[in-house]
Amino acid sequence: MKLEIICAHLLSYTLSIEIPLNTKKFIQAVDKGDQQARRQLYERYRTPLFMVCLRYARDRSEAEDILQEGFLVIFKDIKQYRGDGNLEGWLKRVMVNAALRYLRKWKRSFVELQAEVESTETIYQPSTVQDDQPLSAQQLTKIIQELPIGYRTVFNMYVMDGYTHQEIATYLNISPGTSKSQLSKARKLLKQKVEHYLLEL
Amino acid sequence: MSENRHNDPIDDFFRQQLNSEKAHTASDWNTPAEEVWEQLEASSSRRRLLYLPLLAAAILLLLIGVWQLYHYLQSQAAVIQELQAQVEELQRERSAEQNKNNESLVIEKKSVEQFSADVIEATTSVEDKIVSSISTTRSSIFTDSSNDSSILNTQEKSQSTAASTKPELSAPKSKSPAIVQSNIDISALPTAAIPTLQTSAPDLTVSTVLLPTSPNRGWSSISLLYTPFSSSTQLPPRHRRLFQQRTVSTSNLQIGTQVNYTISEQWFIETGISYAREQIQQEYTRRPRFLRRNERRNNNNRLESSYDFALYSPQGLVEAEVVLTRSMDSATPADNSDLEVTVLSSTSMQSLQIPLLLGYQYRKDRFRFDLKGGILFQYQWQPQFEIDAVTVGNTAFEARHERRPRLRRSDTYGQLDWSLYLSPTISYQFTSNLAIQVEPYVQQALQPKTLRPSPMLQRDIFEQAVGLRLGLRYIL
């Protein structure tokens, strides 16, 4: 298993050097359904995009569902990529949209989210975080996954993916004020959880 | 959309850690399973493979229909042209006859005038004769001095002479050719026939286009269809990683009404509405099946293990979620554990179908063979019930209330889809109103859309199906 991952990583690294994946010809090949081109694109970007999915999902299974749906959208809409910006950035945007669509489709609505926020508000107290603690990316992702869906979504969109509160409000059909308050509560909860993990360690 | 972004230290911490190069190094945890690519590859190639023949068949059927319609209209145009030519010829004949009749009338008029003149002339001559005879008689009276009775006899004689002149007058007139023609009965001439003929000609042209060539252009019927066999492939929405694509066999009873409109001798359009109630016959399993186990630490530092089960019965789907919550805090008592059971059950799937089909029919005696294809609009729904929350254990730790089991209507799943439909149907009409039919079919969903997803019971996304319907049709 380890060898397979190393090989895949080497392949993606090699592909990223030798083949310019954002060229017009390559994009056209993906758009026309060339399986080899699609496979190259998938191999190259599956890890960063899967990390996006992991942050938005509750668990690995959900993240794989989101990744699959996101890649189907990418293959269908790749002609919309104009080639002037960063391809990875565009792909991440598509994947975030796929994640939001998935959450909206199969999860509770974002109206329930606010009740969830209020019920947990009184439980956690804010605390400080020490930057030099040895928490891995996997552990941090797991901490984000443990957040309630509303906290998790707003935190991911604002902090990790650079959306504004206004944009978040539009996407999630909530008010900008709610987005801000949820972010604040998410931060507090994250500090609490990080502290707890560090104590366990 | 500018906004002052306030960065908290925790934001920077997460951003730095998760965007670092080290975090992006491929590893077990951040590499998706190989099945994801397999699914992606399979779904795109399968879609292509399945879409193409059905799409090609539908397009071919449509093209044949358009071609047939074009030829039908062409043939109708030829018939119209032929009819117009016939009408023109008829008009020409009529106008020639009219001219001839007009000429006869002129001749007749002249003859009548001549006849009148002759009559006047004859009368004048008779009068002259009478006058002359009277004068002769008078002179003879004066000369012969006869009695009054002789005068009277002479007058009677003159009258009888005058009366006898009429046949004498008609005799020479009958010898005239003009008088021979005047024997035609003028009153019997069809004076109104000519203008009527002129106005009826355009009517004939219009009616050929608007009215059907056949008196019976369509029929409507009430049908009762039983589907003993229908096999569809479906994609489970969330557990596809576990079970991949699966096949579901169902049977259903369908009642509906259809309208069949014939656009040419062989081609027809069929539409209508029908209601069906589905019975699931065979799922991938009938016994309780462990779906998945999740473990997560909740907000109160308690380990929450959830177990999902699914049971597919002929009556519908039953899904259960068992959540066992245990305290991870050594300071709290050991009995601080909860067991929560939620059972969701769904009834049979129901659906409303509206077909819009183009068909080709072939009839022989009482048998009829149809090949029809087109779009089938379908709305499926499934009421679901929830037996909610059997909670066992000490619930003081969490702000939960112990709930007694209760049954409540949870939600109604709804799915709207439209699919390509193709069916060769054979029917036998054994009375004028009653027919039986066998309808095998193939169906490919185009864009299924879940309108009301259930929070827990998630129906599979219908992809394609093959089936057989047996039907009884009452033709209205």
Image: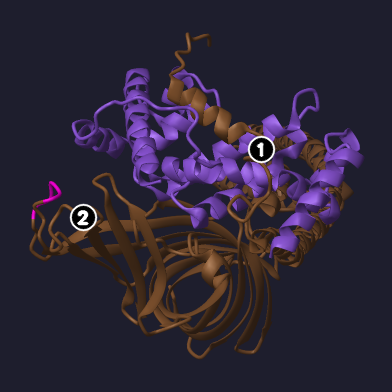
Chain colours: A purple, B brown
Would residue B190 be visible to someone looking at this image? no
Identify the residue at image location x=61%, y=46%: A50
Number of marks drawn: 2
- Of residue B277 and residue A34, the one placed in the foreground of this image is A34
Residue under the image location 49 percent in, 19 percent down? A164
What residue would you read off at disc 2?
A: B330
Residue B421 spot, x, y in % from top left: 61, 67
Badge nearest the viewer, 2 or 1: 2
Q: Any mark on residue B137, and which?
A: 1
Please identify the quarter of the rendering in which residue B62 is found: bottom right
Q: Nearer the viewer, residue A198 or B194?
A: A198
Q: Is residue B398 magenta?
A: yes
Residue A191 versus residue B301 in the image, above or below: above
Left or right of B180, for residue B356: left
Give the dominant element type of the magenta stretch: helix, strand or loop: loop
Instruction: Tell whether A50 sits left or right of B205.
Output: left
Residue B289: percent from the left, percent from the top? 39, 78
> Looking at the picture, how far across and down is residue B406, in whole percent?
11, 64
In the image, is B308 to the left or to the right of B52? left
Q: Is residue B207 visible?
A: yes
Q: What is the span of residues highlighted in magenta in the rendered image?
A: B397-401
- Where does residue B336 sit, x and y in percent of width and height? 14, 59
Question: Which residue type carries mark 1?
Answer: Thr
Give the chain letter at badge 2: B
Whole-Å distance between the Cαs marked 2 and 1? Answer: 171 Å
Query: Is B361 or B136 nearer to us in this picture?
Result: B361
Which three-letter amino acid code belongs to the residue tagged 2?
A: Ser
Q: Secondary structure at mark 2?
A: loop
In which quadrant of the rendered image does the C terminus of chain B lie? bottom left
Instruction: Indicate whether B442 appears above or below B366.
Output: above
